[in-house]
């Protein structure tokens, strides 16, 4: 976590999520709002703890993938860009407003064929509203 603080030039203030699994820090770096999610790791002896970066979330229009996909892109853009080279899945999501699964809210998830990296695109009415990058091994 110290390396990230040095990179962004600010001390991170972590807040636990509702399940006490992830701790988040909301930051602005180079004018881009991001939410950094950390998991707590304890060594085998149980004597020390540290935080490992697990995910980065943003709703900024200034962030794009290498393929040019970002907030504001649509579902067709995602399909056309990623259908050949990635494992992908698309899920309908629960909507608190209607208290049910919604066909308007989706998550489009890409997983690299060899890496542990996952990119999730959250969509509302087939437009990307948030991008989440995470890794399933030892942090980002």
Image: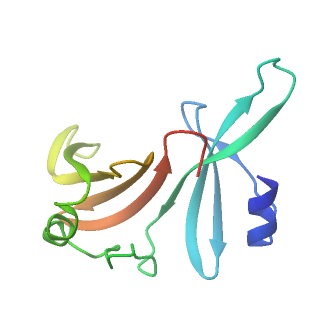
Identity of the residue drawn at 76% across and 69% down = 7
Taking the view exactly as shown, the residue that stands out farthest to the right is 47
In-image side of 6 versus 57 (left or right): right
Viewer-side residue, 98 vs 107: 107
Identity of the residue drawn at 60% across and 46% down = 139
Task: Count how many numbered circles sit on residues in the image.
Answer: 0
Identity of the residue drawn at 18% across and 72% down = 77
In-image side of 58 versus 45 (left or right): left
Residue 122 position in % (x across, y down): 31, 57
Quarter of the image for residue 17 reads top right
Quarter of the image for residue 49 reads top right
Viewer-side residue, 83 vs 74: 83
Taking the view exactly as shown, the residue that stands out farthest to the front is 114
- 27 versus 43 height, above or below: below
Identity of the residue drawn at 21% across and 70% down = 81
Residue 131 position in % (x across, y down): 40, 62
Taking the view exactly as shown, the residue that stands out farthest to the top is 45
Residue 120 position in % (x across, y down): 35, 54
- 28 versus 112 height, above or below: below
- 123 versus 15 height, above or below: below
């Amino acid at each position: 976590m110290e390396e990230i603080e040095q990179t962004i030039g600010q001390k991170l203030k972590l807040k636990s999520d509702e399940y006490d699994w992830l701790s988040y820090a909301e930051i602005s770096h180079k004018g881009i709002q991001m939410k950094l999610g950390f998991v707590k790791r304890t060594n085998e002896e149980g004597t020390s703890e540290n935080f490992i970066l697990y995910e980065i979330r943003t709703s900024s229009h200034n962030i794009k993938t290498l393929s040019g996909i970002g907030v504001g892109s649509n579902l067709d853009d995602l399909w056309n860009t990623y259908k050949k080279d990635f494992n992908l899945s698309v899920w309908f999501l629960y909507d608190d407003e209607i208290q049910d699964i919604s066909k308007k809210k989706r998550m489009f998830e890409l997983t690299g064929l060899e890496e542990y990296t996952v990119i999730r695109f959250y969509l509302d009415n087939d437009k990307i509203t948030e991008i989440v990058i995470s890794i399933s091994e030892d942090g980002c």
